[in-house]
Amino acid sequence: MIEVRKAEQRGRANFGWLDSKHTFSFGSYYDPKHMGFSELRVINDDKVTPSAGFETHGHRDMEIISYVLSGTIAHKDSAGNIKTLPAGEFQLMSAGRGIYHSEFNASDSESLSFLQIWIQPNSFGGEPGYQQKDFGQAPGLTTIATPTGEDGTLHIKQDARLLQLILAPHSALTYDVPQGRRVYVHQIDSTLAINDVTLNPGDGAKIAKESQLELRNDSDLPVKALVFDLP
C-alpha cells in the first residue's frame, strides 16, 4: 500500500522570516490524520530569510536531522558545538536528556532552505550528541543514518535508516523492503515514480506491506529524494 501526501496538502506557518511547510502535525498545525509515520514525527520544509533564524530553544529525547537544500545554517548549542552546515550536508543532533541550540541563516544576502526531520528515539535520557557529514551526490541509494553508525554513517538512536536517493534521467532501481518494515519517501527534486504512483517536489509517500519498490526517473532531470526505512 502506498499513500501519497501531496505537497499542497501540508500545513503551513509563515512568520515573515520563516516560511515552513509541515508534512505532519507541528506547532499550531494539527491534523489527527497526520501525526507522523512509525517513529518519524516531523518533516518541516523550512525557508529562512537572510540573517534570520531560530533563537536558542530546548529539546529532549528526540533525534533531529537537518538537511540543507540551499544556503548555510549557523548552528550553536549548549554542548559547545559551533558549526556551519552548508548545502548538501546532513546534521544529526541527539537531544538526549536535554540540549539547547540555535539555528540561523549564516548569510546576510541569500535565503536558506532546509529540511528539519524529527525521529523518536528508542532510548531516553542519554548524553546529547552531535554529528555532521557530507555524503556526496553519488547516483543510487546512499545510506546516511543507521542504528549502529556502521560504515561511516550517522548513528541514530532508533531502529531506523535514512537513505539519500539520486537517480539520473531515465534510470531506475529496485529497493527490496525488509519484511515487516515500513518506508517513507520525501521527494525533493524532479518527479519520482514509485511502482504505480508519482511524487513531485514536496510530496511524500507512506509505504506499508510492500516487499519491493521500483524507483524510476522518467524525466530529463535528476531526481533526489529521502528514503526512510522504519520499524
Image (cartoon, helix red, strand yellow):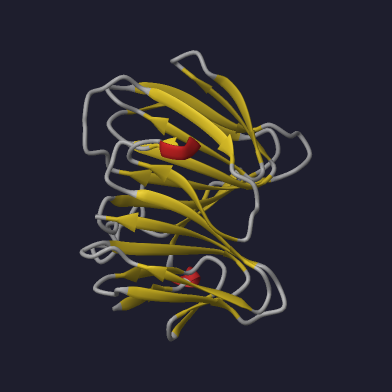
Looking at the picture, does residue 39 appear above or below residue 168? Answer: above
The residue depicted at 37 percent of the width and 44 percent of the height is 118
The residue depicted at 67 percent of the width and 69 percent of the height is 168
What is the quadrant of the N terminus in the image?
bottom left
The quadrant in which residue 218 appears is bottom right
- Farthest-out residue, bottom: 196
Q: Position of residue 61 (x, y in %)?
A: 27, 32
Please state if 1 lies on the left or on the right of 196 as rendered.
left
The residue depicted at 24 percent of the width and 55 percent of the height is 231
- Farthest-out residue, front: 151
> Which one is in front, 129 or 56?
129
- Farthest-out residue, top: 80
Q: Position of residue 88 (x, y in %)?
A: 64, 45
- Asked if residue 55 shows in the view, the reply is no
The quadrant in which residue 64 appears is top left
Please state if 223 lies on the left or on the right of 26 as rendered.
right
Looking at the picture, does residue 135 appear above or below residue 43? Answer: above
The number of callouts visible is 0
Q: Position of residue 65 (x, y in %)?
A: 45, 41
> Which one is in front, 97 or 208?
208
- Asked if residue 160 shows in the view, the reply is yes
The quadrant in which residue 201 appears is bottom right
Looking at the picture, does residue 207 appear above or below residue 166? Answer: below
Q: Position of residue 104 (x, y in %)?
A: 60, 32
The residue depicted at 70 percent of the width and 45 percent of the height is 111
